Amino acid sequence: MTGKTIRLSKLFPDGNRAVVVAIDHGQTFGPMEGLVDYTAAARRLKAADAVLLAPQMIRFTDDLFTGRGSPAMIVRLNWNSIHCEPWHYKEAQTIKAYSAAAAARAGADVLLASLVLKTASEAHDAENVRLFAALAEEAADLGMPIIGEVFPAGDLRSQTEEFHDYVKKVCRIVCELGADAIKTFYTGDRFAEVVEGTPIPVFALGAEKLPRQIDALNLAAKSVAAGAKGVVYGRNVLQASRPADFLAALKDVVRGRATPEEAAATYRLK
């Protein structure tokens, strides 16, 4: 058993599917609703299987990562302009923001880096690949797993078939560049094709805040039914009226302990 395998297993307690909560939005959104008081938000996430964050914000998480049963720490290594949604950037300019070694010293269990292709520039795509592959090599040298985050450029998400094709192909590409797991968008009824073509765990992300909490639970249920090993949710947890209750409901759905309707009823969610 390798160091990568041991560390990655922390995301899947007792072999179950994982619920990861992302609190790294401030890197590209600023003080977003639900994360204005960062420490208070972190304190509500002790029940998550893992928490994804920017490394420089570990100092504000209080005791989130300490003690038995605490979430695994996933640290983001690169910064990508495509995530600056309020500013409508389109080119996916990417830089290395943190090294794998620095993340290990800070206490990370798992690393994460994004990869965006089809930016309309082959040279730019190649540079994004070079950066991701370099970070994956850094991670491998330390025996640390790295999650590849697959995002689209431009308005590809509005083109259903093209978007699915992109996600399916880039998930396999990022695996072959060294990723040990993947975080990406649920693409609809054919999402199982993404999972089938990628021989590493795939996590479906929650993306934007959905109108109703039951909608977010349904998205999670569809994702795991298609083979996802878990979900990565941010705004749908952080901006819930009762984040801890929504997180508990989400875990029940992802683990297969309840349907979305049953979980919503148990925790009085709308």
Image (cartoon, rainbow, N blue to C red):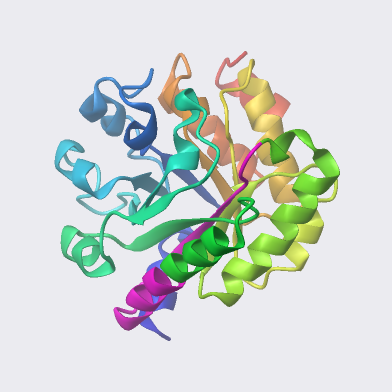
Number of numbered labels in the structure image: 0
In this rendering, would 159 be left or right of 24? right
Q: Quarter of the image holding residue 243?
A: top left
In this rendering, would 222 be left or right of 250? right
| Percent position of residue 103, x then y | 24, 61
Q: Is residue 248 above or below residue 161?
A: above
Q: Quarter of the image holding residue 177?
A: bottom right
Q: In which quarter of the image is the N terminus?
A: bottom left
* Residue range highlighted in magenta: 133-154
Q: Is residue 121 above or below residue 8?
A: above
| Percent position of residue 147, x then y | 48, 61
Residue at 37 percent across and 61 percent down: it is: 111
| Percent position of residue 169, x then y | 72, 63
Q: Is residue 41 magenta?
A: no
Q: Nearer the viewer, residue 247 or 57?
A: 57
Q: Is residue 134 magenta?
A: yes
Regarding residue 211, the answer to whether it shows in the image is yes
Residue at 64 percent across and 15 percent down: it is: 211
| Percent position of residue 144, x then y | 35, 73
Q: Which of 103 and 122 is in front in this view?
A: 122
Regarding residue 15, the answer to whether it shows in the image is no
Residue at 61 percent across and 62 percent down: it is: 122
Q: In which quarter of the image is the C terminus?
A: top right
